[in-house]
Each structure stands twice: as C-alpha cells, then as structure tokens.
Image: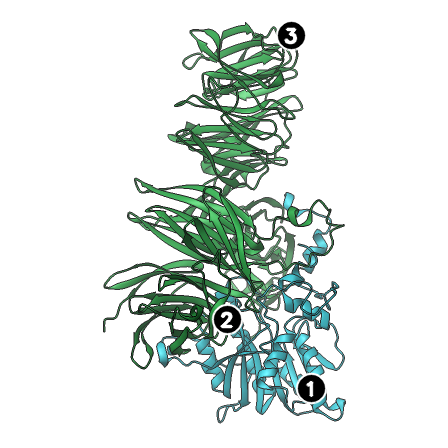
Amino acid sequence: MGKTSKDKRDIYYRLAKEEGWRARSAFKLLQINEEHNIFKGVTRAVDLCAAPGSWSQVLTKNLRQNAANVEDVKIVAVDLQAMAALPGVIQIQGDITKLSTANAIIQEFEGMKADLVVCDGAPDVTGLHDIDEYVQSQLLLAALNITTHVLKIGGVFVAKIFRGEDISLLYSQLKQFFEYVTVSKPRSSRNSSIEAFVVCQNYQPPEGYVPNMVNPLLDHKYCDFNQFTGPNRFIVPFNACGDLSAYDSDTSYPLLLEGQTSYEYKEPVQSPINPPYKDILDKTKNMNLKST
Amino acid sequence: MAGTVFSEVIIHRASKDEALHHLRGHKGVIFSISYEPYRNTIVTTSDDRSVRIWGPNVPPAHAHNTVTYWEGIEIVCKHEVYGHLARVMRSCITNNLIVSVGEDSAICYWDFDGKLLKKALTHQNGCIWSVDSDGTSLVTGGGDSGVILHPLTIATDYCQENIIDVGVATPKKVLFTARNNLVIMDEANLIYYDVVNKNKTEHKLNHESTYKLLALSSCKQLIAVADMAGKLDVFVEKCKDEAFLLNIVDTKLQIGKILSMQWAGNRHLVLCSGDGNITVLASNNARVEVYANFVLPNCKERWLTASAIELENYRFIVGDRCGNIHVFIKGQNNPVKTFHKVHGRYGPTSISVGNNRIITTGRDGTIKYFSINGDVVKHMSNKDLAFEWVEKFLDKGENIICGFQERVFVVYNVNENSKMLEVACGGGHRSWDAVRYFKKVNENYEELIKLIYLKNSDINVVTFQLSKIVSRNVINGSHAKEINCLKSHRISNATVYITGGEDTTLRISSVDAEMNFKDEVNFKHLSSVRTLKTFSIDENHFLVLSAGGRAQLCIKDIKLTNKDNNIDVTSEELVDYLIRGTDKERKGNQTWRNCSIDFDPEMRIMDIDVINDKDGLIIFAGCSDSYVRVFTFKEDSKKVEIIKEAKYHKTCILKTKCIKILNRNILITCTTRSEVTFWNVTDITNDNFEPFFSTKTNKSGINSIATVNVSEDKVLVATGGDDNAVHTIIVEINVQNNMTSARVLHTWKSANNHSSQITGLILVDDYLVSTSIDQRITLFRWKIYEEGIDCKFLSQSHTMVSDIQGMDLLDHNCESITVCVFGKGMEVIAVPKIPE
C-alpha cells in the first residue's frame, strides 16, 4: 500500500495527523461535545482506557477555558497500557476494575469527584463481532462501575458501545444510573461501523446504592429484556452528531481538498508503544516464518 | 485454571481464597489454556503470538489429582515458541504433539520440546477459532464457517521416500508409464525400469544429436523419443503380464530441426520444427504418416509447449512458448482461432480437452477455461492458484492439480480451494513427474500420489498415501469474512446463492434438497466485493454484475444446469473493468520511487443497479467519492463504457436502486447524509443527468432501501438507516415540469423496533420485513389511509448471523415469507405471515 493510501481512504485519519491528534477518535469526542455540550463547566475529568491519548488531548484543549486558573483543571487518564506523556494530564497506569484505581483518581482530585468521565476503550478486537460486542459491553460495565466511585451526582458519562445483539439490555442498565441516556453517532465514526457512543447525563444512582468493586455491578444475564419485542423493548433516542458540513468518514476525498492548493504527507503523531506483538516482531526481525 | 486479560494464568483451588499459582510471561491477553495431566503439561496461547508450554520445574512426587501435587509444585515456562503470524486462538495436546491454531489460518504442530514440526494453512485464509483431537484426527473450526477433519500427522509419517538406483550414471529425463513403471533417458539409451520386479531393460537410441525429446501419450503407454535431426522412435508399454517396451516405430523424419514434440491424445504426435512448421504424425498399421501440417504464427520462441486434440472435430489445440493458444483444423495451415498471451512467458504447461471445454495451465499461477460450442471456442474464466508453476491435472475430473511453489511441490484441490500436499523437495528439477493412482492396501483401495524427480543425478521417488495425509471437509466453508451482498436463485429443488464478500471473493454456492452447502465456483476481485446484481437472460441463465473496492466492476455470464442433483455452473468472464484504470494505466512505467503522489481518491463502488436499454445494459454505480456514474454494457463487444457522471451529492452514496413508474425509468440514490434522491434516467444517453427530486428520511446514513409501486403514479419507498429507524414515504411522481413537481405525500417512521442500524428491507405484498445488526428480523404490515401511511408491527424473530449486511427474498406463499439474511455467515429463515 502506498504511503498516501490511508490518507485517501480515511479523511479523519489524515485530518488527525494534520491537526496533531494522536488518533482520529479525537474528532468523535469533539463532535459529541458539539451536540451535547458535555464540556460545559467541567474542571475535573477522567479519561478511562485513554491510550493512545487523543481524548485526553481533546479534554486538555477544551477544559482549560472553564477555569480562570489553568491549575484548577484536572484531567486524569487511566489505562492498562503505558501511554506517551501529555502535558496537563495526570496518568495512572492501572486496572479500572480495581478499587485502588478509583481511590487513586479521587486522590488526584483531592477528595473531590469528577464532573465528567469518558471512555473510548475497546477490547483488542478479535474480529468476531459478536464476541467483540460482548467484551465491549463487559468493558463498558467495568467503566460504569468505576464511574460510580468517582463521578459526582449530576455528572456526565460518555462511553463507546457496539450496537450489537444485546445492546438494549445495556441501555436499560445505564438508564438505572442516569436520567438521560442518548446514543450518539459522530459523523467521524464510519457509517459501516457498529460503534456508537452513549451519552449519559445527570448521574443519579438508585437510592441506597453503595458502589463496590467486589460484586459485578450488573450481571450480564440474558434476561427478559432481550425477549421484549417491538414497542415493548426499551429503546433509547438516537442522534447523529457533528456539523452537517463536517467531512463524512465514508466518503473518499481527493488528496487536494476543496480550497487547498498543496498536500504534504504527515507521519502519525504517536506510534504505538509496547503492543502485545512487540516481542515477536523483535524476535522475527531476521527470520522468515513463512518458509517453515 | 483461568487466563486473564492481564496476560497471566491463575490456578485456583475451589475451596481456597488464595490462588495457588500465577503463570506470568505472556505479553498479551490469554486466549486459551490446555492441560494434559499425564504429561504434566499446560499449554497457553495468547494475543502476543506465542505458544507457551508450562510444567513443574522438577518431576512431581505426587499424583496430579492430589492437593499436595498442586500445592507442592512450582510451575515454570519451559518453552516460549513462535510460529504464528497473528493471534494464537487455541491449542490442544495429543499423545505426541501439541497443536495450535491461529488468526493467520495456520495449524502449527509442535513437539513437547517446542520444536515446530509442521505448519499448514487451511480455512481459506480465515481465522481458525477452535481445535480438538481424539488421538487419531484433528478437527478445526474456522472463520470461513467450515469444519475440517485433519489426519493427526506430520506429513512425513505417511510418505515413503527412496532413491532408486537403476544403474544409470547420468539420467536426463524420467517419466511414469501407464503401469507406474519408469522410463529414463540418458545420453544414449532409453531405459525401462520395472518398479515391482526391480529390473531394467535398455533400448539403445541411435541418435545423431545429444539433444533429445521425450514424450508420453495421454494414456502413458506410448513413448516417443526424437532427436533434433529427426530420428524418431516410438515404444509401446505392454499393458498386461510381463512389463516391457516394444519398439514399434524407428524412422527418420525429413522435417528439419525438431524443436518440440508432444502427443495430442493417444494417436497423434505433434512436432514443431524451424519456421514454425508443425507436423502431426499418426500411425496407420504400424506405418507412420503425416496426418496434418500447420504453421505456427511468428513469435519470439517459435515452438510448442503443449498440445491436445478434440476428437469429435479433430481440432488441435496447441500452446506456444510465448503463452499463446492456437486452434488448428486439419486442412488449414493457419490457426482458425488464436488466444493471445493466455499464459506467461514459459507457455502453457498442459492442455486438456473434453466435455466441450478446454482447460489450460501455465507457469503464471493460473488455470484457464475455454468452452467449445460447435465451431466457436470461447475463453470463459480463469482460476488463480496460490502457487506459480501450475503443471497438470492428476485426475480425469480436472480437479486435482500439481505444480511447484518455489521449492515446494504442491498438490491442490481446485474445487475445495485447498492444498492437499506440500513436499519441500527443492524444486528446479531437471526432470520430474507425478502420478495419482489407486492401490489395494490392507483390503482398502487407497489413493496414492507418487512424485519422481532427478536431483544430483539421483532418481528420487516419494509416495504419499492420501487418506493418511489429506484433510477432509466435514462442513464446507465459504467466505472467510462478511458477506456484503447476496442474490439467490432457485433451480429445481436446489437453491443457488451468488455472494460477494469482504474477503474479495465472489462465489456461487449451492444448497441441495438435503441442505448440503457447497461452493461451486469462486472468483477473485482486487478488493472487497460490496455489491452485486443479476440480470436475467433465460430461466437459468443470467449476468452477474459485481463491484466494490478499487473501483472495480466485473460482469460474468452464468449458466446453471441441474444434473442428477449436481449443480453445474458454466461461467464466462465478460468484463473486468477498473473505472480508474489499472495501476499501469494510471502510473505508466514509472518505478514507485519516481511516482509522484496520486491525488485521485481511491474510490469504492458502494452499490450498483442495472436496467435494460434498447442497445444494451445501463449500469448505475453509486461511488464513495459521491459521484453517480453511468455505464453502458454491450454484450457483443463485451465492453463497459462510461457515459455519464454526476456529483450532485456531497458525501458517499450508499445505495442505488432503479424503479419503473409511469413508463419511466427512475434511479434512486441514498447517501450517508440521509438524502433520498430521484433521477429520471429514461433517456439517459441524451438527457442531462441530474436529479428531479430529493428528500431526507433518516437521521443518518441510509443502509437499505426497498420500493413498491402502490398506484400508477405513487411509489412507496422504505429506508433503513444507521439511526436504527425504518422510514416509509409515499412519493407521488408527476411527469409535468420535467418531473420536478414530485412530492412526498405521506411519511411514517419508527425507531422502536431495532436497536442497531437497519441493513436489510424487503417489501412483499402488504408486508415490510426489516433486519438489523441487532440480529432481529421484524415483520410489519403497511397500509395507506387517506390521511397517511401506517406500518403495524406484527412479529420479530431472531437470527444467529452477526454483522448482518442485508437480506434477500427467497420465496413467499400464503403462510410465510422466506428470507436469507447474510453478514458473518448466512441463514435462511421463514417468517410466518400474520393474517389480518
């Protein structure tokens, strides 16, 4: 594949490199904010599953204007994997299913709770979408679980979901904790992709709910929710977000965009650090596995 | 034992809170753990591409089913091994092997010291998800939906490899005869070697030149030897009792310097001498006479590499060294038909004729199929194989083919798209031959393949017992990734599915009355196949138009016949068209280094539709660069030409659909920005190509559309989108004012029936069927009232297919509507109708 092929195939991949974002997903959060105004008044934010860090980048850029003193804006990024450092972002390399991680976050906020929790995490996709969907819903529940520890009442939670077979179950579970649950599809997310984002506003845990990490918060049982059919099923509102004049992620654009006179290839902003396949790449550098 | 996403394996005792062991070392998510107590072995596989073999550091003193065993041992990683190129999904432990399978469609066979013994690729490049063994066989389940049974062996177990010493110092050529004996040619002799009795007979060849040609007839009984000067000997192998050769022809030809010699069938010997003179000899009561003379058209290396005869019309089909195929008829010097550059620069390696077709193979990695219909010989289709040097078929059914992939001898099953055998014999042999035969071994007739080759003047013979080596399909697989488009076709009591997929293949598969699924043919695109349409010519005869990535559009002529429950597919590739031109056309002869940046977007064709026009077909393509392009296709010239293109839309077009109303052809296009746009294409060649009406339905991209005319001038359009909603609109078409007064009369929508994007819609009678990635199929009844349109929810059913890309209508009767949903796999479902 030519060096420029990926730039042609995906406009947002190219724009991300040109605008200095670590990943194209930065545009998704920006477009969600355009629609739902989730950054309003936020000074303490948590970015779960943050690597490679594009959402943390968006948060730093947008939240600074919310406080007179830049020091008052606190962004905590949590990920299992190591992530290249970002100015203004506190990093915790930890597991979101552990209480210690939740405590570490609250400690960073000096005992205060977060205004906003975002999670763009996806399991390392297996390629079998129904498994991916299941793992994604598990990940989302883990994210929701830690959120119940760190989010203030009335706070906002935004997370990636895969709209698969059991998604209506997930919606109903989120609905127990938030007043408003909307499914939002940013224009920078491909039409063909099953990905979407839940925007959960006004955190109101059920009365008497005590967050804990030991029991799974919501058991992924195949309960009656799935058997509801037709209008009986709980359906959350859907919207497409992002400016209508924004670029469309399914469209092939020429390298010279409208109004441009030159094009220059840009290297990716941040290459992966320490992926699981690093060892084998190192080990097989001088070896040809194909010819065994 | 449990593997975690944090790269460790934890061993727990049920009654204890604390874990007994933590096995650390993997760098990625653990995908599987297998355990064999009698060998004290744990095998783990992971995202990090490694297979790890674990065991106690010292031999344990207690039995494995005791608490003391588990509490007392220390488990260490004994071997960390790499053989897969992608994630390793599963492993299993057998008596003497560890087998692992992975996302790279490889099965790796390891010994307990972590040595890679064998690696085999299977499941058509799909991921292998599962593996198990009963001690004698191995079974794998793959991403191509197939289940395959493999003999549990590392190939060398069931092959005999010998060097036959026949006492010939410098053998030059070696071939198998009809009785699987050998003919060996050296500088001066032809040696016949009886393999069973291990004796040889020498036939002295009184040739003038040392350059000699050796050829065997199709039946392998006749052996012709000629030298360049024209001395010709023909021997016949005795077919019964004692094996020996009889010299039946000994003559000197006066045809000049002989450059090539092959048998065409069993009676005609085709010789090519200087200036392209082709002489066909035939025997007439032991007398050799010239049967026909032809002239090979001029080419760089003017001689033949393969010959065959079609017996009904006595047509000779020959291939020359420049890759051309010629058809000659007795009495005419020049070819009656020539196919240029059919195979690469080494010329065709074999030509077989029969059942009204010609099949040629070449060293360009392809098999090419031609049809014979009376006087007409037509190139029909190609098959690309995974190895470069395709030599010849080993069976009469033209299914098992052999050749070389660099240094490896390969035997390949064409129908199943799978390698049967791979032998790393070194390749580049001076002379070699392969034969397939049946032999009684322990009461059973066993299928054997024998390979013979010369290496360092030794004659090497390798024999394989196929039943012990070759894998067998239990459930036939198909597409290794999502099916993007599907059309079904009924033929007597079978159903044929034409499918295009993300794995870049276009397949025609059949399901017979007993529900057996089988791929019949398999074509390749350059990139993903996103859309296909059929255009009916006759009952079981149609064109298949397919398009997708790399702006590629292909058209094939398909004829189906059902012979005793076997579907026979005859296909002719009419068009393989790249809208943007081939790489060479776009970039010229520049090397990649000098190539300037190509600013043109790499466009995909998202959807096509086709209508019949007075002088051919008109094809409409909705493209990802937001253009609608219009092409004509004329069957006689087999050419696709672009006639119109329009960039009305701003974003990617997802769907195109043609309807006919008020005697006009109307094209509907749908985009990622929810536009539903109407174009009058009745007189497309003359009229301006621009829409007359556009509206918006869904809140997002439109993934599916269905239409039905509800009155003379009204059409019901149903759209399904990424916003989980089904919309129906009634559009009234008005021919006045260039149709621009078309309007939407009524609308209806519902987002309550699916929780993911709607990818399939069907309108049949007064029913609307929708399907979605949420794996549900919803049935509605639509009704038009004075004041509007309403769709009433009737029922919902569930499907096992994930990632549904669409739905096709198979059948409907008074009781049910039968649909086929497709995506990651396919499923046929009868949705019961619910009467009012």
Q: Is residue B411 visible in the rendered structure shown here?
A: yes
The hue used for chain B is: green
The residues tagged by marks 2 and 3 sit, at their Cα atoms, a distance apart of 79 Å
Instruction: Give the residue type at disc 3.
Output: Glu
Kindly check if marks 1 and 2 are in contact, taking CB atoms under 8 A apart as contact. Answer: no
The residues tagged by marks 3 and 1 sit, at their Cα atoms, a distance apart of 94 Å
Instruction: Give the residue type at disc 2.
Output: Gly
Give the residue number, with chain letter if any, for mark 3.
B208
Q: In the figure, is residue B836 to the left or right of A17? A: left
Q: Is mark 2 on a helix, strand or loop?
A: loop
Instruction: Give the residue type at disc 1.
Output: Leu
Q: Residue at x 48, y 94 (%)?
A: A207
Q: In the figure, is residue B808 to the left or right of B471? A: left
Q: Dot 1, crowdedness within 10 Å: few (<14), some or many (≥20)?
A: many
Relative to residue A14, is residue B439 depicted above or below? above
Give the residue number, with chain letter if any, for mark 2.
B701
User: Which mark is first along the chain, 3 or 2?
Assistant: 3
Which of the labelled discs sits on residue B458, or is there none? none
Relative to residue A37, is residue A161 depicted above or below? above
Quarter holding residue B45: bottom right
Q: Choose between B187 and B741: the one closer to the eye.
A: B741
Q: Mark 1 lies on which chain?
A: A
Give the residue number, with chain letter if any, for mark 1.
A63
Q: What element carries label 3?
A: loop
The residues tagged by marks 1 and 2 sit, at their Cα atoms, a distance apart of 32 Å
